[in-house]
Image (tube, helix red, strand yellow):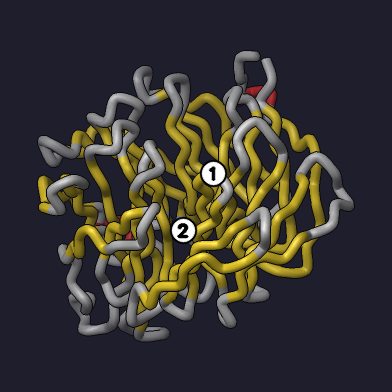
């Protein structure tokens, strides 16, 4: 069934007591695996509002990312480890000390053979999913901001064909890599997504929080929050910039209500930006026509979201809630 973002509605809400940072979905189902502030990965049937949450991998600290490959979940967290987990038998298959600081994000290659991890040690590493072998170590981000504070490497994403990988950091620097060779191909800059307050709080806020390649891989969307007047609150516009990454040129930008874009989903019909501030926000944009399709609210601040197989339902996770959003024609 075709999707129509103008008809966006909340089909279901599942209350939680924790914060959910990441979500992965079993194909052709409502089964979700979520990364939690309670230090665990949970399995939840999102077709039911009162479904039991089944416990899986325990990191001992916040779990910030989870991805699925067949019957295996791979998770990363503030402990710097990656855990491979057998979801049928509920046991750890492999544990790797992947990073020296907090893991922020994981990206799975489209063919399921490689997984990339980024962390606050400012390194991206690509791993063989089957063996856990480290394939590449990518260093293209400065460990310190221009004002000599520690930076953060927030997000990574593979292109739809799996040939390229993009990584984005706190100061708006985005690097595009050859995923097979492990070498840098290009870089683009989105400094508007980074705010430095050298007067009130002597700290920075913002950064690249969402990345998505276009379906043909030629363009890259970068999401976050625009310039902020008050760093104690997200008093800045949610913002997306789109680049022709090979030419290093920005080709489009759009903004929405105050808040931060944490997730980008790009289909052949639309680019979706979802996140939150004082409440949840969602934006749909027609990149080809350079026109907004719809902007609205969702029930909570969203950290991650995943699209269903038919492209007409989004499973969003965040602060104390899971929301199932429908985009039916």
Q: Position of residue 62 (x, y in %)?
A: 57, 75
**Which label number is shown at residue 70?**
1
Q: Quadrant of residue 134?
A: bottom left
* Left or right of 304 on screen, residue 7: right
Rendered-image quadrant of the N terminus: top right
| Secondary structure under the numbered disc 2 in the rendered image | loop
**Residue 176 image offset from top left, x and y in percent:** 19, 48
Residue with the mark numbered 2: 236
* Residue nearer the viewer, 101 or 4: 101
Q: Which of marks 2 and 1 is in front?
A: 1
Position of 72 with respect to 102 (left or right) is right
In this rendering, is residue 189 above or below 62? above
Q: Using the rendered view, name the quadrant where residue 155 is placed.
A: bottom left
Q: What residue sits 23% from the left and 38% below the top?
A: 163
Q: Is residue 206 left or right of residue 307?
A: left
Figure check: 179 above or below 260: above
Left or right of 186? Residue 193 is right
Q: Quadrant location of residue 289?
A: top left
| Residue occupying the point 60% across, 63% down | 35
User: In front: 84, or 9?
Assistant: 84
């Amino acid at each position: 069934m075709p999707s129509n973002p103008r008809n966006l509605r909340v089909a279901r809400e599942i209350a939680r007591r924790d914060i959910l940072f990441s979500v992965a979905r079993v194909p052709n189902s409502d089964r979700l695996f979520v990364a939690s502030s309670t230090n665990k990965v949970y399995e939840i049937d999102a077709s039911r509002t009162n479904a039991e949450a089944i416990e899986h991998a325990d990191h001992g600290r916040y779990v910030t990312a989870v991805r699925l490959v067949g019957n295996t979940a791979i998770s990363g967290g503030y402990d710097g480890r990656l855990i491979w987990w057998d979801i049928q038998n509920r046991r750890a298959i492999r544990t790797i000390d992947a990073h020296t600081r907090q893991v922020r994000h994981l990206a799975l290659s489209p063919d399921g053979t490689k997984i990339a991890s980024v962390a606050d040690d400012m390194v991206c590493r690509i791993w063989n999913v089957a063996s856990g072998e480290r394939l590449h170590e990518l260093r293209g981000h400065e460990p310190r901001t221009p004002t000599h504070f520690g930076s953060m490497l927030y997000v990574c994403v593979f292109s739809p064909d799996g040939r390229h990988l993009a990584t984005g950091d706190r100061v708006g620097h985005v690097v595009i890599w050859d995923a097979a060779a492990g070498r840098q191909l290009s870089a683009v800059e989105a400094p508007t997504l980074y705010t430095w307050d050298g007067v009130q709080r002597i700290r920075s806020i913002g950064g690249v929080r969402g990345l998505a390649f276009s379906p043909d891989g030629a363009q890259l969307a970068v999401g976050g929050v625009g310039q902020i007047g008050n760093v104690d609150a997200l008093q800045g516009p949610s913002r997306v910039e789109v680049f022709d990454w090979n030419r290093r040129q920005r080709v489009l930008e759009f903004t929405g209500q105050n808040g931060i874009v944490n997730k980008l989903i790009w289909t052949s019909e639309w680019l979706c930006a979802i996140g939150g501030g004082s409440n949840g926000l969602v934006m749909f944009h027609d990149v080809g026509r350079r026109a907004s399709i719809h902007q609205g609210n969702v029930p909570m601040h969203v950290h991650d979201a995943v699209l269903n197989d038919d492209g007409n339902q989004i499973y969003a996770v965040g602060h104390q809630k899971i929301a199932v959003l429908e985009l039916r024609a």
